[in-house]
Amino acid sequence: MNITMKAKTALSEISAHLINGIVPFWLTRGVDSRYGGFLTCFDENGNPSEDTDKYIVTQTRMIWGFSALIKMYPQRQDLLEIAKQGVDFLIKYFWDKDKGGWFWKTRCDGTLIDDGKVVYGQTFAIYALSEYYSAIKDTVALEYAEKTFDLLQIYCTDTERGGYFENLEKDWRVSAPGFCAGDRKSLDIHMHMMEALTLLAECTKKDIHMRKLNEVTELILNKMVNKDKGCGLNQFDLSFNSVPAINIRRTWNAEREASEVIDTPLDTTSYGHNVELSWLLNRAGEVMGKPYDFYNTITEKLVNHSLRYGFDHELGGVYRDGPHDGYAIVHDKEWWQNAEVLVGYLDSYERLKDEKYFDAFYKTWIFDQTYMIDKKLGEWHQLVNCDGKVLVSDLGNPWKAFYHTGRSMMECMTRLKKMIDSSNTITE
């Protein structure tokens, strides 16, 4: 098949997977009809697990997901009602009515468990509430998104060295060093800050939001990316000196189940994270009004690094981690990375017109369909090995909800439709 035929095939398959798989999985299981908000922990059979605690990360990601679906299917009243109850639960139980900002974790009924103020969680609140506003123009949601932004500037901005303190306590004191990571900064949290500010700036068009978006984007490129190697660095001290990564409280890396672990002192990079960064950079550039090719040089390097060192050219998909200069050393394949690279490879093909990027997209999509996706239940397994054997079969966990898989399918649909329409126009 030529690229246009493959694009049409992929569009059909991805659309069906979204509408008949991912959406009904979360519609029928994810809404907490008793307490409000969302349930996210499900085993390989789609049954609820014993873990019913609610993290701000996945509560906000579910709000974002249903809000994005409203924009795609505005006639679906049920989607609006689900998103609204999620916002109501979030504001009622996660918002700190005394000092402002969002708590980290509650029990299923909203009882507070962890009152930490993690910037990662604050950014996803901005992201979700901005998307909800974009979908239905709810001014209360936008008000909370803007209040969150203001609090980040007051309490979390490192005015001496730049960027943001990432781990703070209820009263906005910076957390202790070490495992609590008050002495560290990371590409991960600053990248998601950029992601959130992209959507907030798009909604408000305010100069302050645009300026802060540009500021964090430039900081990422100048301090957090190895431009020579073409990969993101991982963790830093407060002055942005790269330091070996450690497990940090309230992070996916510290809580994930994993088969392979890195037992060497190498400072590694995540191939999926780098490709995700590439398309999020381009999206930020669009909102800031940058020229279409403004970030092409660095995004091409980020994507090429993944193809050179982290891509499985035989079966498709990206491995989990590897050194900055050299081949992967952790060969497991995680759901979120193998969802995000679909978008990044398509984005690169659209911008750079090199067929190797579409080939990487298509081969990864085949791998995902064959090994990652539970065809009966419609969601993705958390982790498989390099050959596709399921290692962690859970379909949902405190960190895994609609966001990566659902967003990937929606973003890919948009790009594939554009490709096909452009091809039809040229043919005509």
Image (spheres, rainbow, N blue to C red):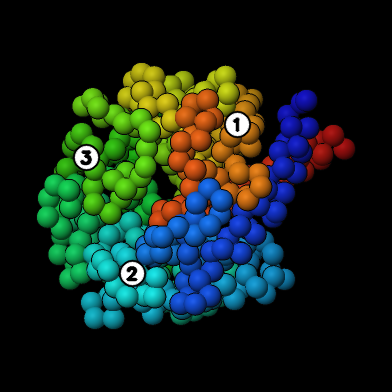
Q: x%, y% of residue 10?
A: 71, 38
Left-right relation of 12 to 110: right
Which quadrant is home to the C terminus?
top right
Alpha carbon of mark 3 to alpha carbon of mark 2: how far?
26 Å
Q: Between disc 1 and disc 3, whose residue precedes?
A: 3
Residue beneath disc 2: 106
Alpha carbon of mark 1 to alpha carbon of mark 3: how far?
31 Å
Q: Secondary structure at mark 3?
A: loop
Q: Nearer the viewer, mark 3 or mark 2?
A: 2
> Residue 109 shows which numbered tag?
none
How packed mark 2 is, by other alpha carbons closer than 10 Å (few <14, some 14-19, many 20 or more), is: some
Q: Are marks 1 and 3 in contact (CB under 8 Å)?
A: no
In the foreground, 80 or 38: 38
What's the amino acid at mark 1? Phe
> Residue 246 shows which numbered tag?
3
The quarter holding residue 76 reads: bottom right
Q: Between disc 3 and disc 2, whose residue precedes?
A: 2
